[in-house]
Image (spheres, rainbow, N blue to C red):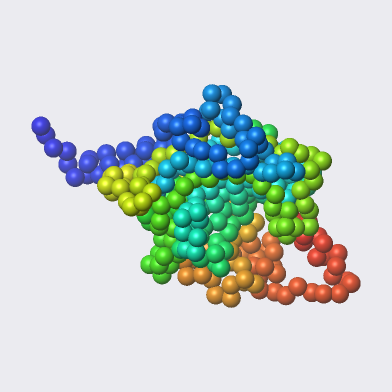
Amino acid sequence: MKLPSMGSSLFLVLSLVSAFVSGFGKRLPILSFDEGYSQLFGDDNLVLHRDGKAVHLSLNERTGSGFVSQDLYLHGYFSASIKLPADYTAGVVVAFYMSNGDIFEKNHDEIDFEFLGNIRGKDWRIQTNIYGNGSTGVGREERYNLWFDPADDFHQYSILWTYSQIIFYIDNIPIREFKRTAAMGGDFPSKPMSLYATIWDGSDWATNGGKYRVNYKYAPYVAEFSDLTLHGCTVDPIEFSSKKCDTSSQSLELSATITPSQRSKMDSFRRKHMTYAYCYDQNRYKVPPMECVINPKEAERLKKFDPVTFGGGRRHHGKRHRRIRASQSETDTI
C-alpha cells in the first residue's frame, strides 16, 4: 500500500477535523429522559412528552422544577433544544448548566447557560458563567441579547468542555470561547460534573437587580426541552476516574477547534449582541482577572455602551441625573 505524503496526510487530518467540528452536535445520539436523566425537584412540575424525548419544566407559586444527568462526566459535549416561556417573565430564571456542587460543596466547578426573564415587551437575556474550584468570588459572566425570540420556537444551546477550553454555542454558532491558562490554576473547571436543567424564581436579582419580580398571575411558566445530548467521558462516582477518558478527551480536543467561518460568526455575534463581559468591568476589577485577554475593539464598544461600567467613570448623583440613571436601567433590560 502506498503511503500518502506528509502534505496530503496533513490535509486529510485537517479535513476530517473540520468535518467533525462542523457536524459534531448533529451526529450524536439523542437520549430519552429515562436513559440519561433523573428528576431533581418539582414533583408534578416536570412532565415528559414524546415518549420521554421532550421534557417540560414549570414554575408556579408552589415550586420550580429541574432534572439532572444520571452520570458524572469529565469533559464532554452537552446540548439541548430549548423553548422559553413567553409574555411577562421578569424574575424567571431558566438554567442549563454543569456543576458538582452537590459533591464539592466548598470547591465546586460550574459551567452555566442562564436565561433571564424580562418585563413584557422586553427580550429574554442570556448569561454564561464559569466557576472553578469554588472561585465564586470571581464572577466570569458574559451577557447577551439574542437575534431571535427564544419563546417563539426551539433553539439549540450547547456546552463543549475539554481539558483546555470551554465553548458555548447557540444553534451551532460559537458565542464564547474560554481557554485554560497556567495562571488560573484550579480556577478552570477540572473535576467531574453532572448536567442540570432548572427553572426557578430569581426575583431578587434576575431582572434589573430585583426591580422586577416574578408575577404569578402569568404562571405557570413553562420551559420546554428536547433533543437532549450527553456525549462525554463518564466517571465512577466513587473513584472519579475512567480509563476511557484519555481517548474521549482527545476527540473532544479535536472538536474544540473553531473554524475560520465559525470564528467570523462568533465575532459578529459578540459585536452585535454582547452587553456585558466581566473582563472589561472596571468598577468590579481594577485589574482584569488573570485569564482575561483584552480585545481592544470589544473594550471600546462596551465602553460606548456603558461608560460607567466599562470606562471606569463614576455615577453622578442629584436630581438632574436621575432621569439619566433611569434610562440606563432601562437599557440593561434590552
Left or right relative to 245: residue 188: right
Q: Which residue is outermost to the top?
A: 51
In the rendered image, residue 24, in percent from the top left (x then y), is placed at: 41, 37
Tell me which residue sits at (62%, 31%) in the image: 47
Q: Quadrant of residue 17?
A: top left
Q: Nearer the viewer, residue 77 or 53?
A: 53
Above or below, 260 relative to 229: below
Residue 173 place in picture, x, y as percent:
51, 43
Q: Position of residue 155 (x, y in %)?
A: 58, 36
Q: Answer with left or right where residue 193 lies relative to residue 56.
A: left
Q: Does residue 45 appear anywhere in the picture?
A: yes
Residue extending furthest toward the right:
319
Q: What residue lies at 55% left-to-right and 32% top-to-bottom? A: 226
Q: Determine which quarter of the picture holds residue 317.
A: bottom right
**330 left or right, relative to 112:** right
Q: Nearer the viewer, residue 178 or 43?
A: 43
Percent position of residue 154, x then y: 61, 33
Which residue: 41% across, 65% down? 186
